[in-house]
Image: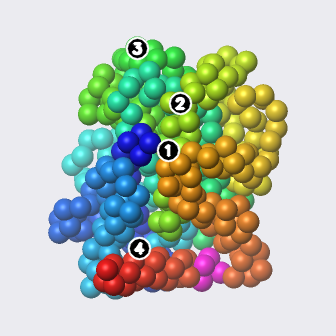
Amino acid sequence: MTNCMLLKGFEVELFTGTFAGENVGIASAITKELSDFVKEPDQRNLEYITVPDQRYAVLKHALLLPRLKLRKWLDCKELTILPGSTLSLGNTEDFERSDIKNCYHSFIEKNYGTKVVTASIHINLGIESLSLLFSALRLVRCEASLFLALSASSPFLGGNATGAHSQRWIQFPKTPSNVPMFVDHAHYVTWVEDQLSQGNMQNERHLWTSVRPNGPERPHVLNRLELRICDLVCNVDLLLAITALLELRIINLKNNIKKYDPVEASSKTLKELALLADENDLLAAKSSLDANLFHWQTGKQINCRDWINELLLEAAPLAKELGMFELLQPIESILTKGNQSMIWLNSYSKGVSIQSLLQKGIYEMEREETNFIQLKSSY
């Protein structure tokens, strides 16, 4: 059964800044010296992309090694990697361009400003079959809110608590504003071409939604699903747990399309499912694990924690069969203790400053990397 596991890769966006938690833009200098990293439109964050692999142990190395390389470079500048997915202590008024000559960056700055200056994790899972890919897109879009709730790490913006658990997802401009639940590949191609001709999308990449098809020649040549909704997950074991749950959902879907594809298993229309999914995403952005969401199968309200627990129970037999059960354990801890935003907000309500919380987060990221180095050297 292990041969049914999917290729998995990550696009990881990070903020750089001081050890006091203040954002500092230095992406242009980093990308000149470190080929693993690419610039985002704003100088204050940058991205690295992992090579796809099926094996979770390999993925852990792929996620941590670029961080170690970046941290070593930043140490010489007395800078560090910042936790969180928004400009927690940063200037939210001014856009700090990383590439003044890039026309697409100009478009982004003019139309969106600092709303797009966020850090996140994009999880890519390889799916060659187009029919399975679009079934998976429908299922994952209907459940994307659950993955956002597990990852939420952006309760602060510009030195203040926003009242949301994922300020990133609330402020990030979903584009185009109305994205349908795609019937199949032909529907997707026609829709994208229409959006481009109408100017609603500037290029094939300009589809900013919770989940989208991806591939070497979008929209025509596709080979993977990209979950874009997650906030930055600094703890790699948790990120791999979230990825494992996502993969198990898709493998279960492949094994039983009628049970898991919303087209087959829901009485709602595709339009109703799209509206339900988008509403759930916003509810999860505001309250994450405490949110009351709407289940795509029944339309009835269900607590986010309860729904995730249902998914874990349903995934358990397959997880054990594939040797993935232990990978899921960090999710149990999140359901009990709360996600990063909930932990931060609980401390903030007791008088702990945002700066102190970020400093603790910086230390926890460094500690994870140190533990990884020690474990690696012991082999």
Q: Which residue bears the numbered disc 2? A: 255
For marks 1 and 3 on the same chain, the one whose residue lies earlier in the sequence: 3
Give residue 20's mark. Answer: none
For marks 2 and 1 on the same chain, the one whose residue lies earlier in the sequence: 1
Query: CB of mark 1 within 8 Å of CB of mark 3?
Result: no
For marks 4 and 1 on the same chain, the one whose residue lies earlier in the sequence: 4
Q: Is residue 322 above or below residue 179?
A: below
Kindly report which numbered mark, 4 or 1, lies closer to the viewer in this rendering: 1
Chief SS of the magenta region:
helix
Front-lying residue, 253 or 104? 253
Q: Is residue 124 above or below residue 198?
A: below
**Quadrant holding the N terminus:** top left
Q: Secondary structure at mark 1?
A: helix
Q: Is residue 321 left or right of residue 335?
A: left
Asked if one can make out residue 113 in the rendered structure from this viewpoint, the answer is no
Query: CB of mark 4 within 8 Å of CB of mark 3?
Result: no
Task: Give the amino acid at mark 2.
Answer: Asn
Q: Secondary structure at mark 3?
A: helix
Q: Which residues are magenta?
A: 353-357
Task: Give the amino acid at mark 3.
Answer: Ala
Q: Is residue 292 left or right of residue 213?
A: right
Give residue 81's mark. Answer: 4
Q: Is residue 256 above or below residue 323?
A: above
